């Protein structure tokens, strides 16, 4: 209850910490508290710049928050481009959180932007699909299945052929 009451009153101060503090752990903590502010739209706008934070934990939390905000939404509330960009980030924790955000985005809008997603991040998704860790593999698999409208299973070669076929087709 303390957070429910206090965080909205301190939202401006938390945003300043997130934007300006040199200490990555403080920026991370600010992100942990910000979901206590009621507006999902405000949270998206506030967390979005943190996707490019130099601190790995801050990026990870920002991407996780974006995915959670999008989860179970009937319409898209997070922007596509930063999520696609994050699928190419250097750490697997960045990429898997971006993958889950993309899963939730596709659950809301379907495959309407399939060509754009495959053009920008098809190869990243195929690379993630081949990873051994389920945390990294599973979101890529789910994204590809949502884009394809069917599940081609665990065979990375079948998915690579599908991406090549769809990417080469008419747009």
Image (tube, rainbow, N blue to C red):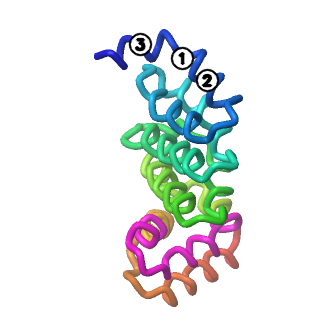
CA distance for labels 3 and 2: 14 Å
Residue 21 versus residue 167 in the image, above or below: above
What is the crowding at mark 1: few (fewer than 14 residues within 10 Å), some, or many (at least 20)?
some
The answer to whether the residues at label 2 and label 1 have Cβ atoms under 8 Å apart is yes
Vertical order, 134 against 162 (above or below): above
Gap between marks 1 and 3, in whole Å?
A: 9 Å
- Mark sitting on residue 57: none
In this figure, which residue is indicated by the disc labeled 3? 6
Q: Secondary structure at mark 2?
A: helix
Mark sitting on residue 15: 2
Q: Does residue 79 appear left or right of residue 20 in this picture?
A: left
Pick whichever of labels 3 and 2 is earlier in the sequence: 3
Is 94 contained in the magenta span? Answer: no
Main SS category, magenta section:
helix
- Mark 2 residue crowding within 10 angstroms, few (<14) / some (14–19) / many (20+): some
Q: Are marks 3 and 2 in contact (CB under 8 Å)?
A: no
Look at the image and say whether residue 135 sits in the magenta stretch: yes
* Outermost left residue: 1
Q: Which residue is label 1 attached to? A: 11
Image position of 45 (left or right of 133): right
Label 2 to label 1, Cα distance in Å? 6 Å
Disc 1 to disc 3: CB gap under 8 Å: no
Residue at the image position 44 percent from the left and 64 percent from the top: 139
Q: Which of 59 and 105 lies nearest the eye of the viewer?
A: 59
In the image, which residues are magenta? 118-140
75 horizontally vs 94: left or right: left
Task: Indicate the quadrant containing the C terminus: top left, top right, bottom left or bottom right.
Answer: bottom right
151 vs 11, nearest the viewer: 11
Q: Identify the element where label 3 is drawn.
A: helix
Going 63% across and 56% down the picture, which residue do you hit? 86
């Amino acid at each position: 209850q303390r957070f429910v009451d206090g965080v909205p009153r301190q939202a401006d101060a938390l945003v300043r910490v997130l934007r300006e503090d040199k200490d990555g752990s403080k920026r991370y903590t600010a992100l942990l508290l910000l979901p206590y502010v009621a507006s999902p739209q405000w949270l998206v706008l506030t967390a979005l710049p943190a996707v490019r934070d130099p601190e790995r934990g801050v990026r990870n939390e920002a991407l996780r928050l974006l995915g959670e905000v999008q989860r179970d939404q009937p319409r898209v509330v997070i922007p596509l481009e930063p999520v696609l960009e994050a699928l190419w980030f250097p750490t697997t924790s960045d990429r898997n959180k971006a993958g889950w955000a993309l899963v939730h985005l596709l659950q809301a809008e379907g495959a309407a932007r399939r060509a754009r997603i495959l053009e920008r991040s098809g190869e990243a998704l195929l690379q993630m699909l081949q990873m051994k860790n389920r945390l990294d593999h599973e979101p890529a698999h789910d994204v590809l299945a949502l884009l394809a409208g069917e599940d081609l299973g665990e065979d990375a070669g079948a998915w690579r052929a599908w991406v090549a076929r769809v990417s080469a087709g008419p747009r």
